[in-house]
């Protein structure tokens, strides 16, 4: 079967988009970001006659601050993400309705996380603002990703973001932060389901083309926050803390989605589709091996640290 162009895919998948948009609207629960922020803890900063920020004011550990900053700055780049999916999905029919609904839901994530951090003085507000400016000036540009690639990427990314928010909330050991990030993670889960179902439908419409897209996105996956200043160092700290690492990415993100899509049992693939599935298996095996090496290094590091503390 010949590959479908973007217009053909938009038309073929539109009924699935409409069905899942309706399901999403029926399932999504209304929530108010202001109800998740402890406003009574807020006070003025220096320029209004208050107290400037200092590290001892934060209840959060260094790693918790880093994780919250990364999660927030990732959410801050929403204008770039909207631009990408608006260009790919268009503004017509259910596609356009989904773009606007998704953008509206995503927008509140940055609002409430930032409000929480400023009110509780969890992070340095000046450094946070500088990082926001740098991140948004860089923008997010995935290049010329085809429609199916964007849908596959969004499936992995939404699930990864859900897990990152949820694990960050637990790691803070701060009840309000955990409640807030759990609520944000619920949004991300519903978004993941939308894109997951869209990819599942695409596998029926154009299986080989979709298999190739999935394979490419697994092999090249990068979190959208990779453009954040110092992201490599911050991501490594989060990985060492077990908030988000290669083991989580393999076990809790990639494998579950591939299993739900039934990629290993999929029939009707052409030669390129079969080749893509073989490449996917190789990428997954490589990711598993890399994850195992990372876990071994982390355990070795933790054992050495424990031994030093015991002496």
Image (cartoon, rainbow, N blue to C red):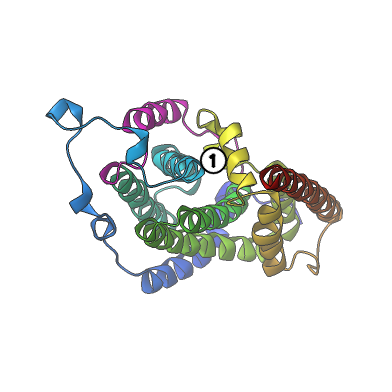
What kind of element bears circle 1? Answer: helix
The residue shown at (53%, 57%) is 167
* Residue 153 coordinates in the image, percent (x, y): 60, 49
Residue closest to the far left: 49
Q: Would residue 228 be found to the left or right of residue 311 on screen?
A: left
* Residue 154 coordinates in the image, percent (x, y): 56, 51
Q: Would residue 202 be found to the left or right of residue 290 on screen?
A: left
Q: Residue 202, can we see it? A: yes
Image quarter hosting the N terminus? bottom right
Asked if residue 137 is among those painted magenta in the image, a careful observer would answer yes
- For disc 1, the marked residue is 224
Q: With respect to residue 93, does 297 lie above or below? A: above
Q: Quadrant of residue 267?
A: bottom right
The residue shown at (83%, 53%) is 285
- Seen from the viewer's position, the closer of residues 214 and 12 is 214
Image quarter hosting the C terminus? top right
Magenta range is 118-146
- Seen from the viewer's position, the closer of residues 300 and 156 is 300
- Seen from the viewer's position, the closer of residues 104 and 64 is 64
Asked if residue 184 is among those painted magenta in the image, a careful observer would answer no
Q: Residue 143, can we see it? A: no
Instruction: Please state the total of marks drawn on the protein image.
Output: 1
Q: Would residue 94 be found to the left or right of residue 239 on screen?
A: left
Badge 1: residue crowd in 10 Å (few <14, some 14–19, many ≥20): some
* Residue 134 coordinates in the image, percent (x, y): 43, 25
Q: With respect to residue 92, does 73 lie above or below? A: above
């Amino acid at each position: 079967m010949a590959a479908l162009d973007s217009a053909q895919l938009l038309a073929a998948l539109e009924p699935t988009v409409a069905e899942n948009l309706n399901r999403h609207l029926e399932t999504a629960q209304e929530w108010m970001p202001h109800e998740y922020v402890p406003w009574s803890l807020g006070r003025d900063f220096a320029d209004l006659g208050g107290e400037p920020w200092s590290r001892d004011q934060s209840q959060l550990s260094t790693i918790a601050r880093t994780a919250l900053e990364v999660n927030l700055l990732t959410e801050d780049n929403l204008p770039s993400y909207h631009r990408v999916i608006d260009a790919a999905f268009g503004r017509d029919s259910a596609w356009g309705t989904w773009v606007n609904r998704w953008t509206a839901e995503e927008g509140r994530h940055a609002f409430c996380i930032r409000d929480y951090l400023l009110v509780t003085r969890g992070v340095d507000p000046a450094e946070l603002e500088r990082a926001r400016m740098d991140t948004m000036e860089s923008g997010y540009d995935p290049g010329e990703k085809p429609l199916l690639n964007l849908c596959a990427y969004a499936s992995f990314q939404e699930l990864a973001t859900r897990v990152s928010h949820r694990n960050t909330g637990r790691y803070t050991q701060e009840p309000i932060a955990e409640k807030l990030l759990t609520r944000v993670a619920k949004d991300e889960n519903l978004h993941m389901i939308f894109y997951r179902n869209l990819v599942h439908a695409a596998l029926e419409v154009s299986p080989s083309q979709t298999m190739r897209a999935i394979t490419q996105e697994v092999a090249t996956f990068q979190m959208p926050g990779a453009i954040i200043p110092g992201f490599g160092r911050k991501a490594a700290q989060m990985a060492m803390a077990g908030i988000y690492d290669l083991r989580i990415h393999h076990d809790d993100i990639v494998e579950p989605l591939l299993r739900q899509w039934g990629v290993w049992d999929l029939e009707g693939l052409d030669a390129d589709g079969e080749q893509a599935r073989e490449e996917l298996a190789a990428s997954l095996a490589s990711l598993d091996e890399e994850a195992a090496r990372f876990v071994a290094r982390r355990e070795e590091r933790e054992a050495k640290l424990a031994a030093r503390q015991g002496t």
